[in-house]
Image (cartoon, rainbow, N blue to C red):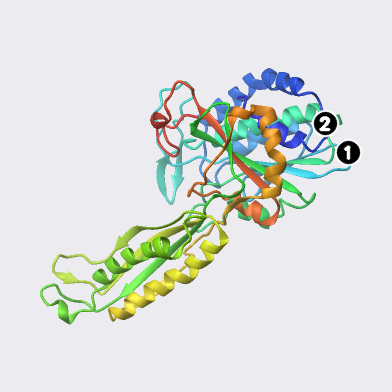
Amino acid sequence: MKQLIPVLFLLLIFTPKITAASNIEEMVNDIEAKVIKWRHHLHQHPELSNREFETAKYITKHLKSLGLEVQTGVAITGVVAVLDSGKPGPVIALRADIDGLPVLEQNDLPWKSTQRGELEGNDVPVMHACGHDTHVAMLMGAAEILVKIKNQLKGKVKFIFQPAEEGAPRGEKGGAELMIAEGVLKNPAVDVIFGLHISSDTDVGKIRYKEGGTMAAVDPFKIVIKGKQAHGAYPWLSVDPITTAAQIIMSLQTIVSREIKLIDEAAVVTIGSIHGGNRSNIIPSEVELVGTIRTLNKAARDHMYEALPRKVKGIADSMRAEVEVTLPLDYSYPITYNDPALTEKMVPTLIRSAGADNVIYSKPVTGAEDFSFFQEKIPGLYMWIGGKPLDVPADQAPAHHTPEFLC
């Protein structure tokens, strides 16, 4: 659990004349067994997004035992605590996500999850298949140590335990966006925020970071193509939405390959769902496509919003079909954007805590994080903390969101 050290130093950089690094490491070593115990408990008792009631109670009990001011029920199940040093200074937030996933665990562990939950009316298995149990345990440990050195701090620390990072259930709101709407960045007003994620393919002890766009914006979309139904033997009597859909799918890739400046950042357009027709000999009247856009800078994102409807409408017109485009569809995440000035200021701290050889400048990823909603409001830094055992090759490490994940 040495991953605690970077979290602490991200805070301590703001407080000169702080406890020596060796003392911090001693405190981390002393609390390590407790953090592991917390993590095992959380792993064994995961809960789905917006249903993290017992998890919230577990966190709250610990924070109150530290004498912290605690607020519960934020964004349904979120927990927020404030550590006030009593001295002037910045308000710095640390965030950990707390929800599990509908995944059936296949690890043989004493603390294996056998939990079940309800998702959209269905009974499903629940597992911490992304490492949020580790995030919570680390932040609980960081809170305990920071309380111990309260007299050496300046300003305030806000601990944010956020529900529903994996997405609220259909028809509900949740996660970082709802926390912000309910005022989590106010009273006291937060100046900067830090977040992290355990990484199953990065060696334990290493930290990966990047300034600017580090994780992609997410913009789901739906395209409904309306044509004219006809017998499959007489296609000239139809306005064929299936062939129109095929042309649209292929053409959307040219936005990325021919219109986006890919030497700056990557972009992705993926169609993940196609629905239309029910027989081999009937050309249907309608086809529905559902997909996602991933971008890493604002210029590319803005261009996608202009180009996708343009491409779709142009092809539909050429095929005599009608088309409806919904973009974004049901939710949308901004770019996880690490403030360049804040990142530059923090890198020496990362090096100081993990060692120069263990701090890695990383390429961005086209996955997404709703931590990005915090970064839209205030400067933030999000980084990856290694969780892979040294004796496991990176290409054999179980991936996030899989039944074998263990990190």
Label placed on residue 86? 1
Say if mark 2 contacts mark 1, CB within 8 Å. Answer: yes
Sequence-first tag of 2 and 1:
1
Left or right: residue 24 versus residue 168 is right
Mark 2: give few (<14), some (14-19) or many (20+) Cα within 10 Å. Answer: some
Say which quarter of the image contains residue 358: top right
Label placed on residue 150? 2
In the rendered image of this protein, does residue 363 appear above or below residue 300?
Answer: above
Q: Residue at x 43, y 58 (%)?
A: 292
| Residue 51 placement (x, y as % from top left) | 55, 44
| Residue 291 placement (x, y as % from top left) | 40, 60
Q: Is residue 182 visible?
A: no
Say which quarter of the image contains residue 224: bottom left
Left or right: residue 52 versus residue 267 is right
| Residue 4 placement (x, y as % from top left) | 65, 29
Q: Residue at x 59, y 45 (%)?
A: 163
Left or right: residue 135 versus residue 141 is left
Left or right: residue 296 versus residue 72 is left
Tag 2: residue type?
Answer: Lys
Q: Residue furthest right?
A: 87
| Residue 94 placement (x, y as % from top left) | 69, 40
Mark 1: give few (<14), some (14-19) or many (20+) Cα within 10 Å. Answer: few
In the rendered image of this protein, does residue 6 appear above or below residue 224?
Answer: above
Q: Residue furthest left?
A: 233
- Looking at the rendered image, the quarter that the N terminus falls into is top right
SS for dot 1: loop
Alpha carbon distance from label 2 to label 1: 9 Å
SS for dot 2: helix
Toward the viewer: 62 or 328? Answer: 328
Label placed on residue 228? none
Tag 1: residue type?
Answer: Gly
Say which quarter of the image contains residue 132: top right
